[in-house]
Amino acid sequence: MSSRTITPRRTAAALAATCAAALVAIAPASAAPAGLGDRITGDAVNRHLIALQRIADSNGGNRASGLPGYEASVDHVAGKLRGAGFDVTTPEFTYDAYYLDSFSLAVAGQPTEGNALEYSPATPQGGITAPLSVAAVDDTPGCEATDFPADVAGSVVLIQRGSCTFADKQRVAADLGAAGAIIYNNVDGPLNGTLGDPADARIPSAGVTKQVGEALAGQAGAEVKLDVQSRLETVTTRNVVAQTRTGRPDNVVMAGAHLDSVAEGPGINDNGSGSAGLLETALRMGGSPQTENAVRFAWWGAEESGLIGSTKYVQGLTFEQQLDIALYLNFDMIGSPNAGYFAYDGDDSDAVGSGPGPQGSGQIEKDFVAAMAAQGVELEGTDFNGRSDYGEFIANGIPAGGLFTGAEGVKTEAQAAKWGGTAGAAYDPNYHQAADHLGNIDRLALERNAKGLANVVEAYSHSTEAINGMQTREERARLRQAQLSTFAAHAEGRAIPHGHNAS
């Protein structure tokens, strides 16, 4: 998952009221009782994580797209699904993969810890040498030209993380003539960032920790030596898509999770956890369940390189094929070791960040709130910030929602009192690092979220009436066509980043 900072949001209404009212929506009178979650166990989900850990251990310590560990992960998941009777495909796609051959950074003659942002352009051999300039720190640091000092041209400019994407920060700096950029974190921990797309990458760009950045902020004018040796290579990789053989193929319930890790580690929380919860749900449901609607499960590739697998999948569908998808559910990190409990804010009732999702997304949020409340868990909202695989579905008017236990954002005192865990620490302190392994998973959060996932998927397999009503296909088409321009304009206005770690 991309780097996301979760801020405290409104909580669900009183637990008992939520359970009583919202579960009516998730299990309409025509639906069979939602009992699939009762058949999901934490041990079974954890078994899938053990498999993914062993695959990583046997393949250089990671499961990154374009590398052997990812291909082995695809084969493992696809084999399990075929054995359960699903129609399974592993469609290929190509993309430009970024490889960093070497990186070094020194300021005032002192080696400085950091790393290149993904898709950073290469410097000339031997690097660049330039004075350090420092952008102003405000509510939108480095997002407007007025944030930069008069001497930014020809410099390597230091910019604090926050508000806009890394790509936007280095673009503004490049427009002002900067030779390079150093972006420093606004929370503790490393900054593993991406510029999102090679086309958006303008100047060599590095990421450093909050502590390093704050120290550099007092060294304006010091000599910077930045050396980035990087390259792009065209990579062919795969998604996994599995659909039930039963149920309406023109009103499909779709649920997905990205299967790839970053190259730095095995990715057991990000996103082995979502992949494992989804896989166990599919296996318990089976390929030919007694359902009204077909269910389509997807495991996406190259999410960590910019949501590429899911984006190419949706863009490869005709409008009629997109119309067949009633809704999309996303599960990206559901076992964070200092877990928070979040559902995507489909109706923008939190009034934070982006606006609401397509019509029906608010109901999806309510249904997840109800499913988790039934387990005694009170959810908070998290913004549709465009940094996971729901992005292209929303952009095409498809209602979306899902669960999330937090990345590098920091747990508040109130959240620790409500959910347990450690206040003032990241939800996942191992995010995008080698320590994102089997030993750093909250198994209670994993089981709770997997059960909630399963119950919501099962309920929608019987009825999506609460999401899309009794619309005719023509009515659904008109609604989605009308929403397309709205979401396209919305996306253009806020420059949706691609990938978890884009801002």
Image (cartoon, rainbow, N blue to C red):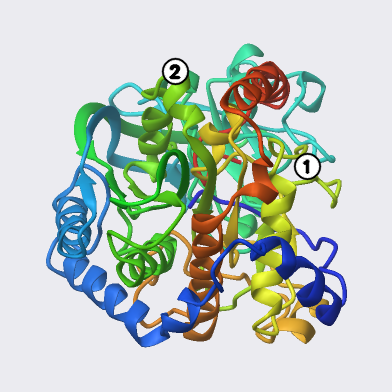
Q: Nearer the viewer, mark 2 or mark 1?
A: 1
The reply, left or right, for residue 367 in relation to residue 107 is right
Q: Amino acid at mark 2?
A: Ala
Label 1 sits on a secondary structure element that is: loop
Identify the residue shown where x is 56% and y is 74%. Answer: 33
Percent x, y for residue 376? Answer: 70, 85
The CA distance from mark 2 to mark 1 is 25 Å
Give the residue at mark 1.
353
Where residue 426 appears, as percent x and y from the top left, is: 62, 70
Q: Residue 476 or 483: which is nearer the viewer?
A: 476
Q: N-terminal of the two: label 2 or label 1?
A: 2
Residue 309 visible: yes
Q: Residues within 10 Å of mark 1 (few under 14, many from 20)?
A: few
Q: Position of residue 168 (x, y in %)?
A: 63, 26
Q: What numbered label is drawn on residue 419?
A: none
Q: Which residue is mark 2?
A: 199
Left/right of residue 341 with respect to residue 107 in the rendered view: right
Q: Amino acid at mark 1?
A: Gly
Please tell me which residue is depicted at 21% across the width and 42% down the height of the picture: 89
Disc 2 packing (10 Å; few <14; some 14–19; many ≥20): few
In this orientation, which residue lies closer to the viewer: 123 or 427?
427
